[in-house]
Amino acid sequence: MTGGQRRRLIGAIEGGGTKFVCALAESPTATLERVVIPTRDPDGTLRDCIEFFNAAAGRHGSICALGIACFGPLQLRSDASDYGCLLGTPKAGWSGVSVLAPFRAALDVPIALDVDVGAAARGELDLGAGRGLRSLAYVTVGTGIGGAVAPDLRGARIMHAEMGHLIVRRDPRDSDFAGICPYHGDCLEGLASGPAILARWGCDLSALPPGHAGHAVIAGYLAQLAVAIQLLHAPQMQVFGGGVMSAGLLPEVRKQTMALLGGYLPHLRDALSVERLIRAPGLGADSAIVGALQAALEALEAEE
């Protein structure tokens, strides 16, 4: 920094069902400081996020723009009276909460808002596994399940996609489990999210013994989502992230995706082509926070 010019700093928040990640950065790939805040009640969680940016400002300087990437469903229409508010979410205590208003009041900077998977899809397309491609779908499998396709065509839709609540065909080995979604019971999230796995088997997927049917059951549900995404959106790549995927599910998801497609799509008839299609995140666990930082930078540049 020379000539007394103010350093342009940007901030980002990735809000998830288990944790909120806050970052202060010089660019989407140059983070100066970050913190992880456990997700609890809305007031306390959002207050801790604001306190992070206020404290970090004393060490690095104030941010000039903020990107928020939050779990949904989230009202993203800027002309709606509840813009920035969570809608009917399964996350207890968060329905109707504005994740935008507290930051507008406390920080007084341009704010870009998206769902977490939307930001993650952007991050992976521009700076991660899909760099150089024209389209990419991102799926997160963790406390909840969500998915988004980039580039986003939200302006032509009522709201963002809610892929986690897709109704899936039940695995016969899983017929006794009712599912945990408070809205749909045995939708994809109700069957294959981290809490659903814990409710069914009493442990995380990674703690199940090798050869346990649970690995194939969960991979089969996620393969149904992969097939639906490909048939509906035809992205060049699908990226699967989130804590549940850390149990080594990707090879089985690919295998069952190819089986479900049944040779219908000529470019996805062999294992290598499906391996190229369905990938792990190139940005690791940072897909959404990088995407949110990108959005913050764009919001800042739009104001200049």
Image (spheres, helix red, strand yellow):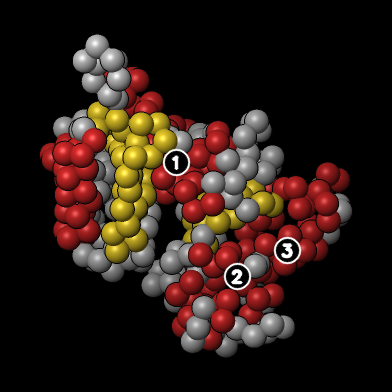
Say which residue appears at 63% left-offset and 39% top-offset. Answer: 130
Say which residue appears at 24% left-offset and 11% top-offset. Answer: 3
- Quarter in which the N terminus is drawn: top left
Q: Circle 3 sits in a helix, a strand or a loop, which is it?
A: helix
Q: Position of residue 199 (x, y in %)?
A: 46, 83
- Quarter in which the C terminus is drawn: top left
Question: Which mark is first along the chain, 1 or 3?
Answer: 3
Q: Which residue is mark 3?
A: 251
User: Measured along the vertical axis of the image, is residue 45 above or below residue 277?
Assistant: below
Spatial separation of the CA atoms under disc 2 and disc 1: 24 Å
Q: Which residue is mark 2?
A: 247
Question: Which mark is first along the chain, 1 or 2?
Answer: 2
Q: Position of residue 105 (x, y in %)?
A: 13, 39
Q: Amino acid at mark 1?
A: Val
Q: Is residue 131 visible?
A: yes
Q: Are marks 2 and 1 in contact (CB under 8 Å)?
A: no
Q: Which residue is mark 1?
A: 290
Mark 2 crowdedness (10 Å alpha carbons): few <14, some 14-19, many ≥20: few
Q: Are marks 3 and 1 in contact (CB under 8 Å)?
A: no
Q: Amino acid at mark 2?
A: Ala
Q: Is 256 left, or right, of 217 in this rendering? A: right
Spatial separation of the CA atoms under disc 2 and disc 3: 11 Å
Q: Circle 1 sits in a helix, a strand or a loop, which is it?
A: helix
User: Measured along the vertical axis of the image, is residue 191 above or below residue 228?
Assistant: below
Q: Circle 2 sits in a helix, a strand or a loop, which is it?
A: helix
Q: Is 209 left, or right, of 139 in this rendering? A: right
Q: Amino acid at mark 3?
A: Pro
Spatial separation of the CA atoms under disc 3 and disc 1: 26 Å
Q: Position of residue 156 (x, y in %)?
A: 47, 33
